[in-house]
Image (tube, grey):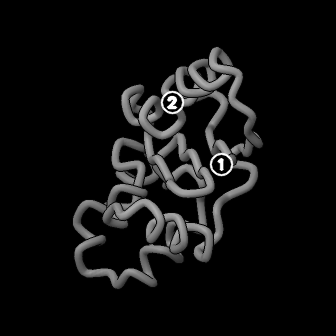
Amino acid sequence: MTFLCYPRCSTCQKAKKWLDERGAAYELRDIKAQNPTAEELRAWREKSGLPLKRFFNTSGLQYKALGLKDKLPAMSEEEQLALLATDGMLVKRPILVTADRVLVGFREAEYEAALG
């Protein structure tokens, strides 16, 4: 299992604490230091079944600075994936990648259902 997070993000800290309290084994990856590639993001989107927009950190400073709320609808999926791959701070976090699913953001009930 891989847990991608930004260590200073409070939501990521809550998710990490949840995992640690349950003794979950995972590989920790700093999303800013090791930005996901377009290929990883494509695979995760497909595995998650979520729309690509859910992978954008819509409350982030970078998202707002680039005016992506207005630009994304006109961009192709490939352009969006390429953009996400340029900066980990554009990516919604945390992301938990398991053998059979991908969880974006932290909702305790989703984690509970995925990991028991």
Left or right: 71 as drawn, with respect to 112: left
| Residue at image point 45% right, 47% down | 104
User: Dot 1 lies on which element?
Assistant: loop
Query: Are the residues tagged 1 and 2 within 8 Å (C-beta)?
Result: no
Q: Amino acid at mark 1?
A: Ile
| Residue at image point 37% right, 28% down | 109
Residue 4, percent from left and from top: 64, 45
C-alpha gap between disc 1 and disc 2: 25 Å
Q: Amino acid at mark 2?
A: Gly
Question: Where is 34 relative to 7, above or below?
Answer: below
Task: Choose top left, top right, bottom left or bottom right for residue 112.
Answer: top left
| Residue at image point 74% right, 34% down | 25
**Dot 1, crowdedness within 10 Å: few (<14), some or many (≥20)?**
many
What residue is pinned by disc 2? 116
| Residue at image point 39% right, 31% down | 107
What residue is pinned by disc 1? 31
Residue 113, percent from left and from top: 42, 35
User: Dot 2 lies on which element?
Assistant: loop
